[in-house]
């Protein structure tokens, strides 16, 4: 079983498990539990069982395959390879690390339509600010509730509750994969935590000397790996719960920071993007940005970031509409854009 097959199984079943877990949340309005119809997790259990934790052991075949894949890349391509992997775990990241889901909400510009139910007929700027805050508060609570509900289903793989068994199996395998990825990157002097922060997705809470020592079987080597990436925060605990702190408010960062790679690569990509976007609006701009995101060339920017970089690109509602309804772009159109990079 190779790396791509493992990733396919983890991605597919993470999406299913989380969908089913969230389908039987407590309804606070009526204080009752509701279930999705015809929940059958047996196929999920069977698929996850194919991934034995020993497959991802230090120095094993999967470890060597992952190491070779990353070792063949330069700095820019390693970034793209890692974000491609992290994208496989988007739903898991949103469930286990609520701040990643919330930050994704916050990074998307809110329109008056988004906040419509919080607005009255005649509104002032203060009303709009209050409406946005109300919407963000609702999202914050939703993210926290989803996290709480997810970790409630992490227990024992021997549990008779098939939902808990499936969630626990998934969680254990993702953690083992995260430790393997962390170790491979550390051996190449790359910091997975910094990459996760940059990309907005997480599968690893922090660097743990205990977990790395257990994984590699060499306590001294774990310390050496962490020293190899400079000044890092190290946790000697083995807990797997996510950080719950709320993201600190920041100003809009420059669009260029969303481009993957070193400064030379960022300049090269930005020049191409300007040639494709300058003078265009709405759908044409959204198509270029969406294609670049899909190709793992840039991280998804906000409307404000795009507008600040490329000038008048039309109104926010039109841009966001096309960024959501991406089915309007044909595969041929997207390939034509990607070929420019």
Image (spheres, helix red, strand yellow):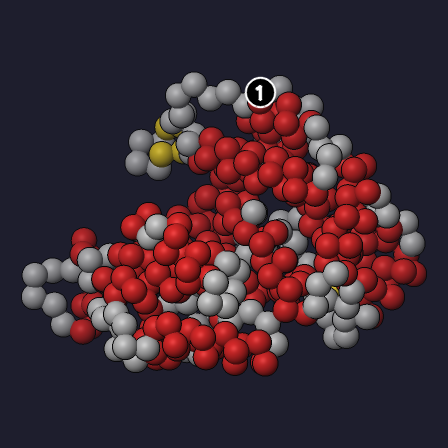
The residue depicted at 55 percent of the width and 36 percent of the height is 12
Q: Quadrant of the N terminus?
A: top right
Q: Horizontally, is 244 left or right of 130 in the view?
A: right
Q: Horizontally, is 37 left or right of 163 in the view?
A: left
Q: Nearer the viewer, residue 297 or 175?
A: 297
The correct choice, above or below, for 170 with respect to 35 in the image is below
Q: What is the count of numbered marks?
A: 1
The residue depicted at 67 percent of the width and 38 percent of the height is 6
The residue depicted at 37 percent of the width and 72 percent of the height is 276
Q: Nearer the viewer, residue 263 or 142?
A: 263
Q: Residues within 10 Å of mark 1 (few under 14, many from 20)?
A: few
Q: Position of residue 243 (x, y in %)?
A: 58, 57
Q: Is residue 236 visible?
A: no
Asked where in the image residue 219 lies, by quadrant, the reply is: bottom right
Q: Horizontally, is 315 left or right of 223 in the view?
A: left
Q: Horizontally, is 304 left or right of 4 in the view?
A: left
Q: Position of residue 102 (x, y in %)?
A: 43, 57
The correct choice, above or below, for 1 with respect to 39 in the image is below
Residue for badge 1: 42
Q: Position of residue 33 (x, y in %)?
A: 40, 28
Q: Position of residue 222 (x, y in %)?
A: 85, 59
Asked where in the image residue 221 lies, by quadrant, the reply is: bottom right
SS state under label 1: helix
The residue depicted at 39 percent of the width and 52 percent of the height is 332
Q: Nearer the viewer, residue 168 or 225?
A: 225
Asked where in the image residue 72 lies, by quadrant, the reply is: bottom right
Kindly give the residue lying farthest to the left in the view shown.
122
Q: Is residue 6 visible?
A: yes
């Amino acid at each position: 079983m190779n790396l791509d097959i493992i990733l396919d199984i983890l991605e597919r079943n993470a999406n299913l498990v989380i969908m089913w877990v969230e389908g039987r949340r407590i309804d606070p309005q009526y204080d009752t539990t509701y279930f999705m119809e015809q929940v059958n997790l047996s196929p999920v259990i069977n698929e996850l069982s194919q991934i034995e934790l020993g497959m991802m052991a230090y120095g094993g075949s999967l470890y060597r395959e992952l190491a070779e894949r990353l070792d063949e890349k330069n700095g820019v391509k390693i970034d793209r390879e890692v974000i491609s992997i992290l994208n496989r775990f988007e739903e898991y990241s949103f469930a286990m690390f609520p701040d990643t889901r919330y930050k994704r909400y916050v990074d998307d510009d809110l329109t008056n339509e988004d906040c419509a139910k919080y607005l009255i007929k005649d509104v002032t700027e203060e009303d709009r600010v209050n409406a946005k805050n109300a919407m963000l508060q609702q999202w914050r609570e939703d993210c926290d509730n989803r996290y709480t509900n997810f970790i409630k289903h992490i227990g024992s793989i021997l549990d008779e509750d098939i939902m808990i068994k499936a969630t626990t199996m998934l969680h254990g395998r993702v953690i083992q994969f995260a430790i393997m990825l962390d170790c491979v990157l550390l051996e190449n002097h790359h910091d997975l935590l910094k990459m996760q922060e940059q990309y907005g997705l997480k599968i690893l809470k922090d660097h743990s000397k205990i977990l790395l020592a257990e994984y590699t079987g060499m306590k001294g080597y774990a310390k050496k790996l962490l020293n190899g990436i400079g000044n890092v925060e190290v946790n000697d605990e083995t807990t797997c719960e996510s950080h719950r702190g709320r993201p600190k408010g920041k100003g809009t960062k420059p669009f260029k920071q969303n481009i993957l790679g070193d400064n030379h690569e960022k300049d090269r990509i930005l020049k191409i993007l300007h040639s494709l976007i300058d003078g265009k609006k709405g759908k044409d701009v959204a198509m270029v940005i969406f294609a670049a995101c899909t190709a793992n060339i840039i991280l998804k920017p906000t409307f404000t970031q795009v507008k600040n970089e490329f000038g008048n690109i039309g109104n926010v509602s039109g841009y966001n509409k096309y960024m959501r309804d991406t089915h309007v772009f044909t595969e041929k159109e997207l390939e034509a854009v990607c070929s420019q990079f």
